[in-house]
Image (cartoon, grey):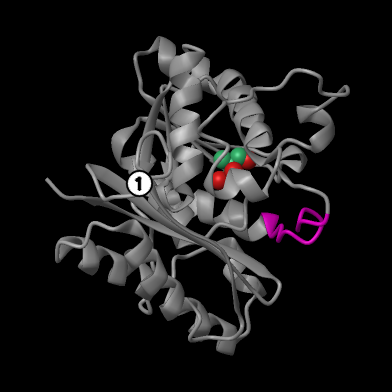
Amino acid sequence: MLVKAARSEGRKVGFVPTMGALHVGHISLIEAAVTECDCVVVSIFVNPTQFGPGEDFEKYPRPLEADLDICRKCGVDAVFVPTPEQMYPTENITWVNVEKLTETLCGASRPGHFRGVATVCAKLFNIVGADVAYFGQKDAQQAVVIKRMVADLNIPVDIVVCPTVREESGLAVSSRNKYLTEEQKKDATLIYKSLQNCREMIEAGTTDIGTITTDMRKILSQAPSIQIEYVSIVDAESLQKLDKIIGKVLAAVAVRIGPARLIDNIVVDIK
Ligand code: PAF
């Protein structure tokens, strides 16, 4: 109703889909929406269909009151907090499967994850009916997948991708940082260090991707607590593997540290 009324009055409606446990990264998306739109909706839904067996669905933090407080303070107009039964009232047998883009990076080790993300985002876009939706660059593959889904399915929503928010140490802000001890958090700063090193190597003219990723792996292995899942440099749009640096590339890292799986990335565009 609120969204319908706002849109019928020609007001621009912004939407920030989240799984809650809101932090400064989410706040930057909400602030962008509040600045650029006349009416802002935030959804809080820990989406079961994007978690695989053995992942952290049950223990994912759900501090609803604190989240609602943040939304109020940021000037959000409405918060949508559905239950799993409301989102999936019957067995879900209709899925949105974005091919190719979901086969690399996180998609390779989290089968079904992006199918769950794309499906819930399509549902949320239909339910909320906003003009523009905001996503974080930290989940780079998610942003590419959602942009493609919206284009392929002609979903009438613009996708805005906002920069990754980092702690002073360089560590990308994530709800999953809560799982880390202080020591593990210190180790986790090597993730961004490896990405910065990658940028420096590319800017200094290194084009061989094997050479760059070997160096990145060396940096990450300075902390024995870090288990590397992938260190990849791919084309920033197709997400396909490259041998040489060419055009706009996405350097992406996924690691496990203790109980947490952490991801981070940078985009490097050498003209
Ligand atoms: O990025 C997230 O928090 C989730 O993947 C999203 C987009 C809210 C879908 O559940």
Q: Which residues are magenta?
A: 54-64
Is residue 44 toward the left or the right of residue 54 in the image?
left
Magenta span includes 171: no
Q: Residue at x 47, y 21 (%)?
A: 150
Between 65 and 49, the residue placed more toward the observer is: 49
Q: Which residue is mark 1?
A: 162
Residue 233 in percent (x, y) is at 38, 53
Residue 196 in percent (x, y) is at 30, 69
Ligand 1 visible in quadrant: top right
Residue 144 in percent (x, y) is at 44, 35
As drawn, 123 above or below 22: above
Is residue 250 toward the left or the right of residue 263 in the image?
left
Q: Residue at x 36, y 75 (%)?
A: 193
Residue 112 in percent (x, y) is at 71, 37
Picture quarter with the N terminus? top right
As drawn, 229 above or below 43: below
Q: Residue furthest right?
A: 91
> What predominant SS class does the magenta segment belong to?
loop
Magenta span includes 60: yes
Please, what secondary structure does the residue beneath circle 1 have?
A: strand
Residue 204 in view: yes
Residue 19 in view: no
Q: Quadrant of residue 251?
A: bottom left
Picture quarter with the C terminus? top left
What amino acid is found at the position of numbered circle 1 in the picture?
Cys
As drawn, 169 above or below 89: below
Classify mark 1: residues with Cα within 10 Å, few (<14), some (14-19) or many (20+). some
